[in-house]
Amino acid sequence: MFTIMSPAEAAALIPDGAVIGLNSFVGTANPEKLHDAVTERFRKTGHPRNLTLVSSAGFGLFDPERGAENYIREGAVGKIICGHYGAMPSTKKLVLEDRFEAYNLPLGPMSHAMRAQAGGHDGYFTKLGLGLFVDPRVEGPGLNRLSKDDTLVKLVQIEGEEYLRYRLPDFDVALIKATSVDAKGNISFEREYSTIDALSIAQMTRRNHGRVIVQVDRVRSDFSRPRDIIIPAVLVDVVVVCEPERDNEAFGTLSGDIHVPATHMQYWYRRLEQENARSGKIRSDFSADIIGRRAARELHRGDVINVGIGIPEKVSKYAAAEGILPELTLSVESGGTGGLPAGGLEFGAMIGADAICDMSMQFDFYDGGGLDCCFMGALEMDRHGNVNAHRGVDQVSGIGGFGNITSATRNVIFCLTFNTKGLYVTEENGAVRIEREGSIPKIVDSVRSISFSGPRAVRNGQRVLYVTERCVFALQKEGLTLVEVYPGVDKQRDILDRLPFPVIDKTECV
């Protein structure tokens, strides 16, 4: 039987040493009021402490003063196991200061492991991750000197073939954000952008005799339609009711409250950009526009596509602007299919989605080769075509869904600038001009950590392009190849002289 409580009463139920399963996707679906209550309790009492936070897709809000970042920074957390750290600005810095144990696992295997363990299985077995950083023979999932837990990812042999087994600690508490609780305690998500791992987290927590705590926007006095229920009442212990603060009309396009035909996509995309601009969270980078426009040329009628966070977001923008969106099916790993992926704070949501499923089901589709093409960002690439997308010099963002998507998709398009930190590029009459080079190269002799294996992609027969603001590289059997140089760019001065290794040159201006 569920009980309706205040955020403070719910936070008081979390014991020291608890393993908490968090349902969130980067900055969306975050149970922020529950996090605030945990922070307040910790500041007053010093409890709960030594917490373990587990989230397949990350749980930050792009603001170090909001959400879980407060109690993480103040010492309540001893371990984080997470697929993505990019939305947690203060936490990802503390990781590299060895303030607590921190692990990064690919998002897909984490989501699948939650579903498998909810069913009593001993984790999730997959080839995904072999040869990447998470492979114990390469680096393993630990992100700092404290992170020595070797139970999370193990190399195993099954009928003579290598697999990785991903296993998460059992959950004592689940913290979930939803929309409504009905008269029986059933939980629905009608105004949320995605359900993510909500049901698996609740089932996994209940299997461990833990508490499932759900933050909702409202209480309904009627009964919900059975097919609309995501978490049945039998799994729910505590409900916390908190009215939403953000209620801009544009957000209704992300939940499906507002139907969005293809002809209206650009209008609503701009509305969301304006909302993000008011919060100071909008990307302004002309290089990204050049890259996004060129990458969008790789779109073909009938393609099913995934678009990643950051520069790749520009691809969907140009697809809509050029009127080809109705002939494509775009998707995001959080579960949305159809429509136009939102960017910025709402990354993971879809404007006008045709359907939204649980994240583990979306990865079933991705892992099975359902995508025709994907557009991914990159921190750096090397002479072998390897890509590092999860760890920089002084920060860690996490691999997220990148590993699953790039390993199983036939056409992989990486979107990255040639260098960074100070790069300034202009374009006039179709000619690109490098006004100022960045001080940090992104094309290096050997990447710092492997998120994508170039040699494995060649063996798998994948088509791989690396689209920058000045040129395009292709990964071919004979090696990394320069295949395009943009008008206005000096090939020798702006490209070849700046590479730390020789490449095969098959260029022609475009």
Image: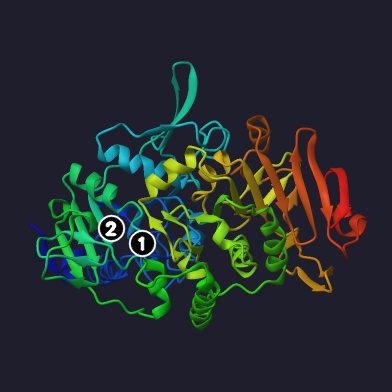
Q: Quadrant of residue 76?
A: bottom left
Spot occupied by residue 274 in the image (x, y as percentages of width and height): 52, 81
The span from disc 1 to disc 2 (Cα, nearest Å) is 7 Å
**Residue 102 makes an appearance in the image:** yes
Q: Residue at 24% of width from left, 34% of height from top?
A: 120
- Nearest the eye: 330 or 81: 330
Disc 1 marks which residue? 75
- Nearest the eye: 467 or 240: 467
* Callout count: 2
**Residue 168 makes an appearance in the image:** no
Crowd tier of the residue under label 2, counting other residues whose Cα lies within 10 Å: few below 14, some 14–19, many 20 or above: some
Identify the amino acid type marked 2: Arg
Q: Quadrant of residue 223?
A: bottom left
Q: Residue at 35% of width from left, 64% of height from top?
A: 29
Mark identifier at residue 49: 2
Spot occupied by residue 316 in the image (x, y as percentages of width and height): 58, 63
